[in-house]
Image: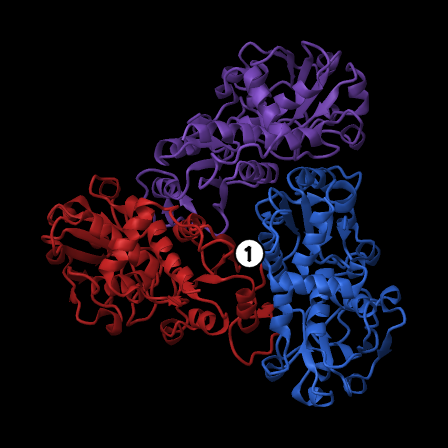
Chain colours: A red, B purple, C blue
Amino acid sequence: MKTFTSVKQLGDLGEALTQAAAVKADPFADQAPGRNKTLLLVFFNNSLRTRLSTQKAALNLGMDVIVLDVNQGAWRLETGRGVVMDGDKSEHLLEAIPVMGSYCDLIGVRSFARFESREDDYNEVILNQFIQYSGRPVFSMEAATRHPLQTFADLITIEEHKTKARPKVVMTWAPHPKALPQAVPNSFVEGMAMGDYDFVIANPEGYDLAPEFVGNARVTHDQDEALRGADFVYAKNWASYTDYGKVLSKDLGWTVTKEKMALTDNAFFMHCLPVRRNMIVTDEVIEGPRSLVIPEAANRVVSAQTVLKRMLESL
Amino acid sequence: MKTFTSVKQLGDLGEALTQAAAVKADPFADQAPGRNKTLLLVFFNNSLRTRLSTQKAALNLGMDVIVLDVNQGAWRLETGRGVVMDGDKSEHLLEAIPVMGSYCDLIGVRSFARFESREDDYNEVILNQFIQYSGRPVFSMEAATRHPLQTFADLITIEEHKTKARPKVVMTWAPHPKALPQAVPNSFVEGMAMGDYDFVIANPEGYDLAPEFVGNARVTHDQDEALRGADFVYAKNWASYTDYGKVLSKDLGWTVTKEKMALTDNAFFMHCLPVRRNMIVTDEVIEGPRSLVIPEAANRVVSAQTVLKRMLESL
Amino acid sequence: MKTFTSVKQLGDLGEALTQAAAVKADPFADQAPGRNKTLLLVFFNNSLRTRLSTQKAALNLGMDVIVLDVNQGAWRLETGRGVVMDGDKSEHLLEAIPVMGSYCDLIGVRSFARFESREDDYNEVILNQFIQYSGRPVFSMEAATRHPLQTFADLITIEEHKTKARPKVVMTWAPHPKALPQAVPNSFVEGMAMGDYDFVIANPEGYDLAPEFVGNARVTHDQDEALRGADFVYAKNWASYTDYGKVLSKDLGWTVTKEKMALTDNAFFMHCLPVRRNMIVTDEVIEGPRSLVIPEAANRVVSAQTVLKRMLESL
């Protein structure tokens, strides 16, 4: 793979899952392709899981890793064209990106939606400039509209735990104090379309995701109805797409509680983390025996390593 | 070793010193156990020596190292139970810790006393959660009540420089502008009990350390009397234990000066660093021929490497 | 080399360029000398190119690298002598430097001019303390008065692109919103004296560089006259040396535009980056076919690797 910005680029899911299982079974099996290859991880935003799991995945493959926090210890970057740069930004992305590309073999980029312009966010302005100007294969460590390494880890986790050929998976919106991007839910919808899942999205009115992501997926505004018979409950907050970037509700009636989980078919609980406890989900559900949040996070190494392996093969 | 939170866990001091000497003589002797092992260093607080020496020790052992500064580039962490997380903290330690554990083989944690609650500090709430929830061997890179890697380096340094079978070691309080934790002095008292030392603690009234650490150690409030005949002067500031976290004195009469050192038996001067010059110790003493602060700091690599080696052996 | 603080320490330029070409042709040719050698990079200031290219160069040589951002996650450092350290600085450079030296084999230091005292800056107080007290070979990653790794990369780039035995190289001042150090231009003047170049410096009145750097170089205050017939235009802003650290002009008449470039002999455009677009240079020039800024930045790896290789050989 020359880029990895959407989980759909994995192609056949079964094949990707087989590769992931092999990586998980023997993480150090093959370090030759990574030798003398340098991975640059560029963070425009905070990160815990992505930062650590992607480093670990690269180390497992024998690569060297350089981490760059753009807002700490580097220069602030201008992103607009034609600007007279007489302010506080010392460098333009148009120089910074090819320069970064000169110092590595592969680039991972984390750049969240900024909620300043839906058009800019949904055009993935930052990520696409990396693809266009870096001269290197680029993968997303969560961009404005997708978080494909997370979704692949989610798919691996569901496949490891499902007990039915076609499990019911419910992605439900849940309340959060701040405006969060739609990258994780958009990306999860893409992932659901890659396998055989009875998939339902539950969210309050005003929170429907972008039509180009929802596609034919079933959407309901009745959380209880969605949860009935669910095998997996995938909770996530996101800000409004239609009223872009706004927090229209903090309704704790959408929090995933023990009572809500009782509506399901003894479903597993999933969340990409970080999670606001007692907003998104109660302590007892997330700490309960059906919570998959930790194995799901652990699979981030498997997801990243499988993707990095493919990208290394294409160098 | 499955954890290393107190220098006492080293067991027999003579054996530990022999191992340390071997590590120092040939730091790269054995890198096989570290291969494909990842050490995660988690910093809740600033660090220079610990940050660098622990990395160097791990590299000497052939390990990979990932450094995480919790307050820079990661998410702010909630530590309380049952909290509705609607504030500025994005993630709970109860998720963050097992997630961190998923991405590494060993974890080092630096988490200072917060001085908000003596009970919480002395119960080592943060460090113990890492031990309980990470699923990995955990070692302290200075916690609320102890700094065992420092103490082990101190013991190595004293053993390298002592010229008497039973040297007199004086740990003296000295003034400092801010409230500092008791981790280093507590830990040093633990270390002194492991060998054959004529040990005295000198501090102003109101600065006696916690009884469970002091134990049977001799304590005096008369610095001059303590210093007489000393072979090693170990200076350190700490805030009050009884009036917890308070700065009761900035008395420069306790500063270690040339005149004070003249009371000793040509003692070596030691300090864990960082040190406030002309508060804790005068320029001429710390720059003088009997100052051990630099070899003491250099021994931090030896200390960390000896401990990491033992922990690797137990994986 | 035991230190590298000025490009002149490379000695014979032809020999250095030959070594650089060999490094560039086969960056992984020889990793044995770097094995079990740790490079410490100490940043007192922001960095993108230097941070990444020096890491990459060291990795290419098989070294381990530890990065320390002094103002993030470490202690604030006191640099004055005799100070009673009762303020916000926790550690003195006189301890910090030899401690850092204990944990590595080589040290790179970035420490810009502070513009508080021309004497201190031009005496390279910080860099020289590292040389004096660290006990390790030290190289500059841009100090107060020179940026030799940049200059060497500039020389490599010019040699790769020149089509005349003695090309005309014009270093021209250009406007910038903030006061910038003279390190890059000083250093570039030193580099020009090492080869066969028709070299001219163009700057407004009040912006003449320090006489000890300018030496016999030709200086003009007429940019247009300087540019005529140029083969390379090396743009750079710097603050006044005579009226030390002051911004005397932001005259956009000195911006390098298409019209200015038309005066040259189809010159290449060079800049060390980061560059303020439409202050230093217009979009169309920096994005044009004669712009060398990206290959020039890419050569920072070659420059650093050639220097590190020499320093490793002297260990």
Q: Position of C305 compared to B252: left or right?
A: left
Residue B89 appears in view: yes
**For residue C263, above or below residue C249:** below
**For residue C256, above or below residue A290:** below
- In the structure shown, which secondary structural element does the residue marked by tag 1 occupy? loop
Q: Position of A223 compared to C303: left or right?
A: left
Q: Residue at x 56, y 37 (%)?
A: B60
The x, y position of residue C102, in whole percent, is 67, 37
- Please give the residue where the numbered disc 1 appears in the rendered image: A72
| Snapshot quadrant of residue A309 | bottom left
| Snapshot quadrant of residue A223 | bottom left
The x, y position of residue B102, in whole percent, is 36, 42
The x, y position of residue A95, in whole percent, is 57, 72
Q: Position of C140 compared to C48: left or right?
A: right
**For residue A19, above or below residue A28:** below
Q: Residue at x 68, y 90 (%)?
A: C259
**For residue A98, above or below residue C1:** below
Q: Mark 1: few, some, or many residues within 10 Å (few <14, many ≥20)?
A: some
Q: Depth check: give the residue in front, A272 or C100.
A: C100
Q: Depth check: give the residue in front, A46 or A188.
A: A188
Three-letter amino acid code of the residue under disc 1: Gln
